[in-house]
Image: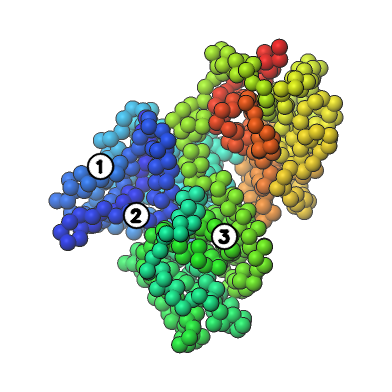
Amino acid sequence: MRIIIVSNRLPVSINRKNGKLHVNKSVGGLVTGVNSFLKNIANNDVNMKYIWLGCPGENISVEDEAEVKEKLKDSNCHPIFFNKAQYHSYYAGFCNGSLWPLFHYFSSYYSYRENWWQEYKNVNQKFAEALFDILQPEDVVWVHDYHLMLLPQLINQLFPATRIGFFLHIPFPCYELFQLLPIKCRLELLNSLLVSNLIGFHTEEYQQNFLNCCNKQLGHATNINSVIAGIKEVQVDVFPMGVDFHGIQNFANCKQFSSEKIRKILNGTNDLKIIISVDRLDYTKGIGNRLVAYEKFIETNPAWRHHVILLLIVAPSRENVGHYKKIKKEVNELVGKINGKYGNLNWIPILYQYKPYTLEYLIRLFSLSDVGLITPLRDGMNLVAKEYVSAHVNKNAVLVLSETTGAANELKDAILINADCSDEIANALKQALEMDPLEKAQRMKKMQETLEKNNVIQWGRNFMKILLGQGEANVNSFSQYLNSSLLTKIHANYSASTKRLLLLDYDGTLVPFVDNPMDAIPYPELLCLLDSLGRDTKNEIVILSGRDRNTLQKWFGDLNINLVSENGVWIKNGSGWVLAKQIAIDKSWKIEINNILQGFNRILPGSYVEVKECSLTWHYRNSVAENVNSIVSLLVENLLKSCSKYNLRIIKGNKIIEIINSGVGKDLAVLQFTDQKQYDFILAIGDDVTDEDMFRVLPENAYSIKVGGHDTCAKYTIQKPAEVINLLSSLNY
């Protein structure tokens, strides 16, 4: 099987120099991230192949096309060529004149021309025709970004059986902005994307905006992570893109790395605190606002003059487009003004570089800086912020980050600011420069732990696992139904093992769902089975549930088993209940969120709120309203802003919406067991999205089983709780 990656540009570009064609590595978050993922699977799975389809550059003559194809064969790259006029209308026109400003909330920059739209359609058609030449029956196609939103439908017309994934690397806007596109464009874009088997976004906000547009524009029913498009349910999920954390750390740690250029750049800065700012030239990046804020910082903090320098690195981009020429002029003028006003022979406030850069070059500069100043006005993710954090092996630095980047959802220990407010940025710079070293290290450590766990390899694997039919740990495999031969294998391993860990969800796993959750009391035979398994000295049993600890204590407190309540908040491992490690519970949000949920109780008859110690759960199992899916989507939309403010997580379970602190999850609870002991047999069984957290952190040799559904990274599936009981009973001999 092969993965066919399709993006506007290839991970390499071609240019002619001194009469010869040269292949150069492309820069940018998309190509760098996807490339890291592809290299990882190529190195670890000899059966997995890939091809990357895209444009190698705009200035390739027809005479050079054959030679370019030959040069790129060894790079697994398949080039597609366009004439310059067509590419300009497609790329500078509809892509970056229409979609880019709208999707980044710059409606005043939005423009539309009919010929742009037609060329956008034509270029997407050419990509489909190029795929026709290389696609094989078992291939999977992964389409990337806003340039190719019409491609899924075109692929489906040519290859109806091909599995298609689509990932949007920029924000998806709210419906009110999406409406600025002509109706025909909106309909074609949405209907094309919904041909995909899986659609991915960086954040929950973008995901919910898309679902809302599908509901309002197309009238499709939506769940929290899917669209019901006719007879097909299309999964729409969140996959925050990461970076190659260990690769960046290793490079930053390399003592042999040295660059004359970097020494020249930083010459004379030994006694200065270095603030570094890195962006591509674009109006969404807020570079002008940042410079105004830096000037305000210098003006209001005279003690820092002559002791700090801003290293402003801007990569050229779309220099022939009017808006970008204007930004470049504005940046040049602001830099000149600030340096002229405050600088002298002994000190320049801003060191400005307007040129392309490599990641290796940036890593070295990042590792030598004191503050990272990353403040776009809006950004889909912003991998530069994640690269900055990853590069600081010594943890002696601070990240100042815009709250309107996708990265802000994960990098909560940065100093988060409103990028439109120069006062906030100026104050954040002072706070960062004067921060206690211990606090710096603690903040950086937490962010690095997040980035190490959610790295770009994991991002790609998580996406492909679901796209490939909800596979197991290896990206090219599928979940298997737990048949008799697999049961025999589990029994044999269980019998031969001496230290076993059994991780079990409760509702939907050990007992079926019922109309009233409090009626799902464990029946005597289940208690007897769990008691018997728990008495086996080789076994350690853990029930991980979303229920509160008082209920679990009442039901299972007398048994020799461990309990985890509220999906990972409290753990009973021995005699008493304790908070899970690394969890600092904030309950200040509960009144505000509860008010929102209670309001929706009035909208949707039959729904109600379950108030737990550290979480809230909105139940709608007993609701029969025809528009229940629309109401659920509207609730999530209303919750997003408040949940983002309090750093909360929204979890969609089986007919429930749960709100809980962001750092909470069954994964952390499971790790507290697996990190403390070495087990030679691990069995984990669960039925909903919270159990996916558990499945993802299990060792490779663990048996993971999903009850019901198919959207899982568990290795195996079974149909219903009765089969779980049969399996556990067969082990208990």
Q: How is the image coloured?
A: rainbow
Residue 188 lies left or right of residue 206; in this view the side is left
* Quarter of the image where one finds residue 730: top right
* Quarter of the image where one finds residue 76: top left
* Residue sitting nearer the eye, 181 or 374: 374
Q: Quadrant of the N terminus?
A: top left
- Label 1: which secondary element: helix
Q: Is residue 86 above or below residue 53?
A: below
Evaluate whether residue 440 shows in this view: yes
The mark lying in front, picked from 1 and 3, is 3
Report the residue at 72% width, 29% height from top.
542
Report the residue at 63% width, 35% height from top.
694
Q: Marks 1/3: CA distance?
A: 41 Å
Q: Which residue is mark 3?
A: 394
Mark 2: which amino acid?
A: Ser
Q: Marks 2/1: CA distance?
A: 17 Å
- Label 2: which secondary element: loop
